[in-house]
């Protein structure tokens, strides 16, 4: 049993403040400080939560070694806590798998995605929006491995879940862009051009009509901009970057 308890709500709220301003240096310092505090009182639950946040931060900053170290620490904590089959472990497996995928280790990510799926099916209702994120990330790994048909099935499942979820339309937009990229990878630039443009237009419609222009919207605009630039939509890429900048500066 832990000797002490750390208030994770307060940690996460402050983290959101830093991330909302793109202040990644302060975000990392904040997480490392509270990880040390959690460790000093043997609060493993808080330690695991913070390691999960560090995984995401290091992945976003492309800090491979730090991200992989956070993966190892997180998996060790799950084993130490004896929670391998509960929802907290599922979240950790998903984050670990996403790190592997981000650093071109998709083959290594799939067993962790599959562990996550097994836990989610046991613990969550089928409409839970967490399935949407899992299906999307798992499909990205399958595309890397040229397993396109399996990936499209998962993308369709992601759209089905997120279309019914509250504020899920931004995830649908991201999924459309993922499908566009998969089609180009499968068919080549020329053969896929019409299909790619169809999916890009679907994503544009969602991004232009989304009402809640908050920090998460800015994050999605930031994330999607480079995809549009890749496909030659340079004006729209610039527009999305500008939207994100205005929101971040107004935070």
Image: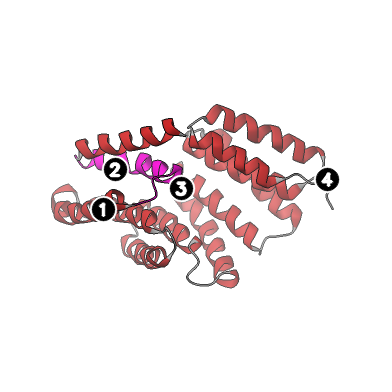
Secondary structure beneath dot 2 equals helix
Q: Residue at x 61, y 38 (%)?
A: 14
Sequence-earlier tag: 1 or 4: 4
**Residue 244 location (% of width, % of height):** 37, 37
| Marks 1, 4: nearer the viewer | 4
Kindly identify which numbered label has been placed on residue 4.
4
Q: Could you classify mark 2 by the number of other residues whose Cα lies within 10 Å: few (under 14), some (14-19), or many (20 or more)?
A: some
**Residue 10 location (% of width, % of height):** 67, 42
Q: Are marks 1 and 2 in contact (CB under 8 Å)?
A: yes
Secondary structure beneath dot 4 equals loop
- Using the numbered discs, state the Cα–Cα distance from disc 2 to disc 3 in whole angstroms: 18 Å
Q: Which residue is at the front of the view, 134 or 247?
A: 247
Q: Residue at x 81, y 37 (%)?
A: 40
Secondary structure beneath dot 1 equals helix
Q: Residue at x 47, y 59 (%)?
A: 134
Residue tagged 2 = 227
What main secondary structure does the magenta stretch of the protein show?
helix
**Residue 92 location (% of width, % of height):** 60, 53
Sequence-earlier tag: 2 or 3: 3
Sequence-earlier tag: 3 or 1: 3
> Which quadrant of the figure has residue 28?
top right
């Amino acid at each position: 049993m832990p000797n002490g308890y750390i208030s994770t709500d307060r940690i996460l709220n402050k983290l959101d403040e830093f991330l909302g301003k793109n202040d990644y240096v302060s975000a990392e310092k904040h997480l490392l400080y509270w990880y040390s505090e959690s460790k000093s009182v043997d609060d493993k639950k808080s330690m695991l939560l913070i390691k999960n946040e560090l995984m995401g931060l290091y992945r976003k900053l492309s800090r491979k070694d730090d991200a992989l170290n956070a993966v190892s620490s997180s998996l060790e904590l799950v084993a130490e806590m004896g929670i391998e089959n509960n929802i907290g472990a599922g979240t950790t497996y998903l984050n670990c798998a996403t790190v592997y995928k981000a650093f071109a280790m998709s083959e290594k990510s799939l067993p962790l995605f599959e562990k996550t799926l097994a836990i989610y099916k046991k613990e969550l209702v089928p409409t839970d929006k967490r399935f949407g994120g899992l299906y999307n990330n798992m499909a990205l790994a399958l595309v890397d491995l040229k397993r396109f048909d399996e990936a499209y099935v998962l993308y369709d499942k992601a759209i089905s879940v997120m279309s019914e979820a509250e504020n899920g339309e931004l995830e649908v937009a991201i999924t459309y862009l993922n499908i566009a990229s998969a089609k180009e990878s499968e068919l080549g630039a020329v053969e896929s051009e019409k299909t790619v443009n169809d999916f890009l237009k679907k994503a544009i419609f969602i991004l232009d009509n989304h009402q809640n222009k908050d920090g998460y919207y800015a994050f999605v605009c930031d994330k999607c901009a480079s995809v549009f630039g890749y496909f030659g939509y340079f004006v729209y890429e610039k527009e999305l970057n500008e939207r994100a900048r205005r929101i971040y500066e107004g935070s």
